[in-house]
């Protein structure tokens, strides 16, 4: 996943302007994707849209499961680790 893909998704699919560093966000999502061995696009949608991922049990009755929260927190920690290091 690239920063340009993240930017394109935010602008064209969500109709918003990115407010975060899209390159750092893409890197954080991709790193988490590799660790979890799961699709980076689905992880991006979980983070940006709160889109449930049934295969990895991110939601239950519309709320985040412990696993869903952990995945989101992992991406956020990686993102802030990248942006704070700059």
Image (cartoon, grey):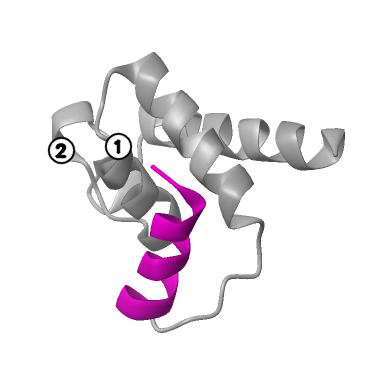
- How far from the left and from the top, in percent, is residue 17? 55, 79
Segment tinted magenta in the rendering: 1-14
Q: Mark on residue 58? A: 1
- How far from the left and from the top, in percent, is residue 83? 77, 42
Q: Is residue 35 above or below residue 53?
A: above
Find disc 2 in the rendering and name its residue: 54
Q: Is residue 58 left or right of residue 81?
A: left
Q: Is residue 66 left or right of residue 56?
A: right
Q: Are marks 1 and 2 in contact (CB under 8 Å)?
A: yes
- Please tell me which residue is depicted at 84% across the width and 39% down the height of the picture: 84
Image quarter for residue 85?
top right
Instruction: Judge whether residue 72 can be spotted in this image.
Output: no
Is 13 in the magenta? yes
- How far from the left and from the top, in percent, is residue 78? 63, 31
Q: Is residue 78 above or below residue 59?
A: above
- Please tell me which residue is depicted at 37% across the width and 19% down the height of the picture: 34
Image quarter for residue 32?
top left
């Amino acid at each position: 996943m690239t920063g340009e893909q993240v930017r394109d998704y935010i602008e064209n699919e969500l109709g918003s302007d990115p407010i975060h560093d899209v390159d750092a966000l893409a890197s954080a999502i991709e790193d988490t994707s590799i660790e979890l061995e799961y699709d980076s696009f689905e992880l991006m949608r979980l983070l940006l849209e709160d889109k449930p991922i049934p295969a990895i049990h991110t939601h239950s009755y519309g709320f985040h499961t412990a696993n869903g929260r952990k995945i989101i927190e992992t991406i956020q920690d990686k993102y802030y680790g990248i942006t704070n290091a700059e």
